[in-house]
Every structure is written in structure tokens, then in C-alpha cells.
Amino acid sequence: MAIKSISEFFGFSLFIFDLDNTIYNEEDYLFQAYKEIADRFAGLYPSPDSKKLFLKMKEIYDKQGREKLFDKFLLKFKIDDRHLHECLNILRSFNPAKPLEMNPYSKQILKELQERGKKIFVLTNGNAEQQKNKIRHISWDGLDKKISFVFAAEFEPKPSPAGVLYILKSAGTEKGRTIFVGDSDTDKNCAINSGVIYLDIKDLYILTGYKKEA
């Protein structure tokens, strides 16, 4: 079922959103974490300065993605791999120097949904403590008070339907009255596996006609 209008979108009762790259830009979090890690290891063993360490992590991210990024980083600078746990701990628990700003489109959509009295959940993959840390540092402007957060890792990671089925039961809402908004094939397949309607966040922007704030 394709959503053809914004009025059709607002006709649903239960709205499930992904978090990373749907509500905010995940790189705003990751790059600050990489800077924190670079600062930690600058001068160790010895290592290059913090800027060079950060730029190498970003280069690995840009060219190879996030898989085993810290393993590759530690190997590159001959840093003992026993520090891998420390890298992960910083990633999951550091305090970003800059608040994580919501995507302005998503912010407007969530605000309007709340004004309409809709049920809103966020279902996110990833390490639960890391995701909770992100949530704590997003500038929600109070919108989070009316959002229920569910961590797929506590059930089964998306695209498993487990998280969505838990939400449906918690909200007491039928599948046909539910829509899942995300940004990836993982989110889309999670919605399909759950039997709920899926809408990509980019397609939602087009439906709403929201313009990016200057």
C-alpha cells in the first residue's frame, strides 16, 4: 500500500519511527565519538596527534564503513587491541560536546503528530546503552516526553518483527492502523515482516512539502 497524501499519513493511529538517520543525523554522534577516542589515544605508544587519529577513523568510516572500524584503527597505529573495549565504551557512553540536533523535517512531523494526539514510538537497532545515550543528547525540545522508546536489541534486532509486535501489543493498536517510518531496507523489511505499512522518511518529506529551515 503506497501512501499518496499527507492526510492519508495522518490518518493512522500508531506511528513507529526509526532513530538514526530518521530523526537525526547519526554522523553528528559518531564523529564526536571518534574525536573523543582520538583525544584519548593521542600520544599513546606514541601515536600521532588527535587530529590525525580522528581523520584516519573518518577515512576508514568513509571508505569501508563501520564494520570493525576500531579494530582497523588500532591496527593502523599499532595500539594494543586490548583497548578495543575502551573504544566501544567511549562510543556508547561519552557526552557529546554539541547537542544532537533533530532533523528539522522530522521535528515538525513529530510535533504535528503530538498535536493530533497520535501514539508515537521509536524502535531502534544497536547497542541499547549506546542508543539510550544518543537519545539523552538529542535536543528534543520536550517532544521526547510523549514518545515511547523501544530497543530492538532487547528483543531481536530489526528486521525481526519482534519489536514492532511488542509495540502493537503495548499500544493496543491493530496493524492496519500502524505505519513505520524509517530510512533503510532493514526498516522496510521489519515493517513487511510485521505486516504494517512502511514509509521512507524521504518520501514523507515529499508528502508533507516541508522546507528545510534556513
Image (spheres, helix red, strand yellow):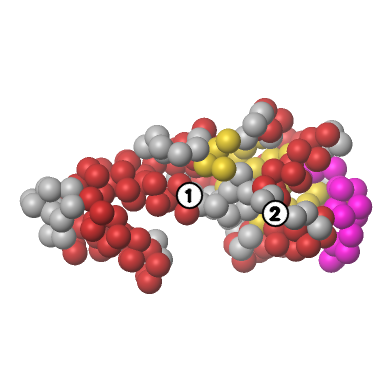
User: Which residue is rendered at x = 58% and y = 54% of the image?
Assistant: 21
Q: How many marks?
A: 2
Q: Which mark is residue 212?
A: 2
Q: Which residue is mark 1?
A: 28
Q: Considering only vertical position in the picture, is 60 above or below 70?
A: below
Q: Considering only vertical position in the picture, is 82 above or below 199?
A: above
Secondary structure under badge 2? loop
The CA span between labels 2 and 1 is 18 Å
Q: Is any atom of residue 62 visible in this view?
A: yes
Q: Residue furthest left?
A: 45
Q: Is any atom of residue 154 visible in this view?
A: no
User: Of the residues shown, which amino acid type is indicated by label 2?
Assistant: Lys
Q: Is residue 5 left or right of residue 40?
A: right
User: Which residue is rendered at x = 33% and y = 66% of the image?
Assistant: 59
Q: Position of residue 34 (x, y in %)?
A: 34, 50
Name the quadrant containing residue 5: bottom right
User: Which residue is rendered at x = 75% and y = 63% of the image?
Assistant: 203
Name the quadrant containing residue 155: top right
Does 6 lie within the magenta span?
yes
Mark nearer the N terminus (2 vs 1): 1
User: Of the residues shown, which amino acid type is indicated by label 1?
Assistant: Asp
Q: Position of residue 102 (x, y in %)?
A: 61, 44
Q: Position of residue 121 (x, y in %)?
A: 69, 40
